[in-house]
Image (spheres, rainbow, N blue to C red):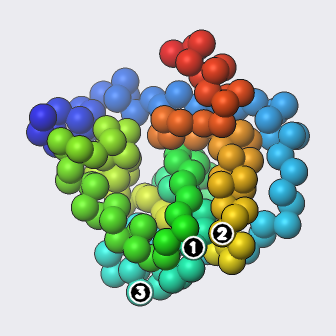
Amino acid sequence: MSLNDLLPDPDKPSGHCPPFVLWPRQWEAYNLSDLLNWEIHPFKREQIDEIPRDPGIYSFVIQPGIANHPYSSYLMYVGMTERPLRERFREYFSEKYNTTDGRPKIVKLLNVYQDYLHFCCLKIAETERIKEIEDELLNAFIPPCNDQYPAEINRIMKAFP
């Protein structure tokens, strides 16, 4: 499969419609309010040295930058790593062109929206909490580029393909 097989026609909106789940019940159930220290970095190679060397949670967010609107963002993916966030950030540049083993949604995200993509990260010193925090964020946001969610959400998502 080539990279072009994964990428949508830039002139047709049908390839640019990820399935967002906007579910207030899940937002209200989120209960980790102590996590406020997110760092935001453009997803560019030259940012590698700015990414923390700590483990933690990260997300990919599309920010179109239209009219400098402060709330124009789309959270697309949430992930975790017990390794350095910098190392995980760097790995995504390899996955960007990996059409044989790369995750199709991620390959598409990294290529189609590369000029608008941001890597948001949250350092977490207590590595035993990383999975719990990732699950809470996945339950609340239900990002369209994730393929796996915590059990309850996973069952619901599989029921509505």
Mark closer to the chain start, 2 or 1: 1
Label 3 amino acid? Asp
146 relative to 33 in the view: left or right: left
Quadrant location, the N terminus:
top left
40 relative to 87 in the view: left or right: right
Badge 3 marks a residue whose secondary structure is helix
Q: Which residue is mark 1?
A: 55
Q: Position of residue 158 (x, y in %)?
A: 56, 18
Foreground residue, 7 or 33?
Answer: 33
Q: Residue at x 41, y 68 (%)?
A: 89
Q: Residue at x 78, y 66 (%)?
A: 35
Asked if one can make out residue 58 in the rendered structure from this viewpoint, the answer is: no
108 relative to 42 in the view: left or right: left
Q: Position of residue 124 (x, y in %)?
A: 68, 72
Query: Quick one: which residue is furthest to the bottom in this view?
Result: 49
Mark closer to the chain start, 2 or 3: 3
Find out whether the residues at labels 2 and 3 contact each other: C-beta distance under 8 Å.
Answer: no
Q: Position of residue 128 (x, y in %)?
A: 69, 64
User: Comparing marks 2 and 1, which lies closer to the viewer?
Assistant: 2
Within-10-Å neighbours for mark 2: few <14, some 14–19, many 20+? some
Mark closer to the chain start, 3 or 1: 3
Q: CA distance from mark 2 to mark 1?
A: 7 Å
Q: CA distance from mark 2 to mark 3?
A: 22 Å
Q: Which mark is residue 49?
A: 3
127 relative to 85 in the view: left or right: right
Q: Which mark is residue 127?
A: 2
Find out whether the residues at labels 2 and 1 contact each other: C-beta distance under 8 Å.
Answer: yes
Within-10-Å neighbours for mark 1: few <14, some 14–19, many 20+? many
Q: Is residue 86 above or below residue 120?
A: below
Label 2 amino acid? Thr
Q: Quadrant of residue 108?
A: top left
